[in-house]
Image (cartoon, grey):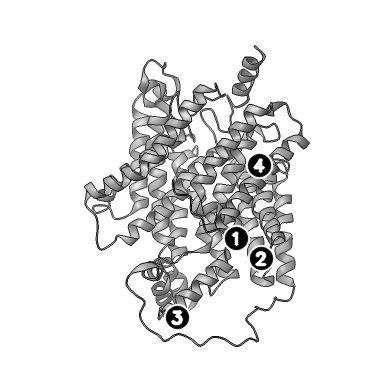
Amino acid sequence: MRSNNYRALKQKFVADLNGGSLGEINAVTFALTTAIIAWSALQAKQRFFTPYTPSAFVADWLINCGAVLFAITVYSKNPLLLNGLVLLPAFVALLSPTSPSPSSGSKRPKPASVKSVDTKGQDAVQELLPVKPFVTMYRGSMMVITCAAILAVDFKIFPRRFAKVENWGTSLMDLGVGSFVFSSGVVSARSVLKSQGKPASLFNRLKVAFRHSFTLLVLGVIRLISVKGVKYAEHVSEYGVHWNFFFTLGLLPPFVALFQSAFALIPSYPVLALLVGATYETLLHFTSLTAYIIGAPRENLISMNREGICSFVGYLAIFLAGQGAGMIVLPRETALLEHKSAEKGIISRIFASRHTPIGKLVICTISYLSLFLLTTTYEGLNLRVSRRIANLPYVLWIAAYNSGHLILLMLSEKFFFPNVYSSTPITEASLADERNKTKHATSRVLHAFNRNGLAIFLLANLLTGAVNLSFRTIEMDTVRSMAILVSYMALLGGIAVGLDLRNINVKI
């Protein structure tokens, strides 16, 4: 009986929540950006994380995991103070003398002869699509805050306004779910870019998509069986009775493969995303679909899982928006830089900057933000954000936030590591040098979280379940709560970096 009562309390703990303000959410999640800036300043000016010693790992973890964990828990009421504390090492590093490179003063190796790179293998891919540190750290930081929040939400130290909203409103975890999908879209653009000029048939695209989907759908079934089997406390209105986030992720690839055919007619993923979101919003607004999702009785398999099924359309739009961002930020920038440098005069350079990745992303961000304001303000359509139905305002919010976040990270990389990418002519030697520079400009912790992201996410889910089955989390005080959360994040960070150090890719 006591166990049933506690389960009911856990369900009530995450139910009927209204979220918080966008300003507070932005201030709290800005810890992701300030952490990367602090890490970059220490590495660029002091080579603090080279070589990567155990103490360097601890510092890396404290900046990129510890600060984020503290931002959503004990510093949740003072996020600006935390951001200032995180940036303090950056200011110290910038004001201190730059640490010399280990190679300075030593004899440099003879440069390799200038010759075209082989059109096959790793160099051919890197020539077109270099590994970009800011994208790696963007993805890694999203995984860090996602892993931190899925366990922290079960403790009182995590503010209720940060937990997922019941129906209407904005919260940190609502942002996290959408950002997870958006970031997946960003990296999926890599396969699209690699196949340009030799597009696969729809059948082949679907075959590859279902191969990617199969594992995620299996994981969804396993999670469903395990949650029902142990009678784990769950919030039905989140996705439905049987649906879960793995089913949403698993169904995205085949639908995205279908939309690649539409790309031939509308060659812009952001526009496709807006069309999908606007069409879905039209159905929500002019039919009874919204009322059905929010309040229909759960009489059959469809109605039991109506939230997950219907919100999938919104997540598809978010994924397409992420793909659009990926098409902008992933390709090599050399040709664009040459075009920009050819312009003369400040006005001409500003006007020409619209052709650069940052310029294009700024245009996307302003467009998403303007449409968000148009749809949500009283003077506009006066719509409310809803993660539960993943409506158009939710899609626009997620797209605007993540596009803006990418801009900040791009600017940070350009400031701290301005010469990380090779310029023309591209040679085997320059690409090898570029690989060393990108490694130097990337946090090992964030690289590790990104490299085995799905495996770490699965481990985080297992650990979250184990903690909730072993402890009465909602009854714990601050000290015990933080002890568990810090240990949990330290374990995830240690395993992620351990796999990375051993060059292990966990294929799922």
Other residues around mark 4 within 10 Å, as few (<14) / some (14–19) / many (≥20): many
Residue annotated with mark 2: 49
Q: CA distance from mark 3 to mark 4?
A: 54 Å
For the residue marked with disc 2, what is the amino acid? Answer: Phe
Q: Earlier in the sequence, mark 3 or mark 1?
A: 3
Label 3's element? loop
Q: Is residue 373 visible?
A: no
Task: Name the mark nearer the viewer: 3 or 4.
Answer: 4
Residue annotated with mark 1: 443
Quadrant in which the N terminus appears: top right
Q: In this image, 228 relative to 317: left or right?
A: right
Q: CA distance from mark 3 to mark 1?
A: 37 Å
> What number is the disc on residue 488?
4
Q: CA distance from mark 1 to mark 2?
A: 8 Å
Q: Residue furthest front?
A: 502
Look at 36% across and 70% down and name the residue there: 124
Q: Residue furthest top?
A: 1
Circle 1/circle 2 CB separation < 8 Å: yes
For the residue marked with disc 1, what is the amino acid? Answer: Ser
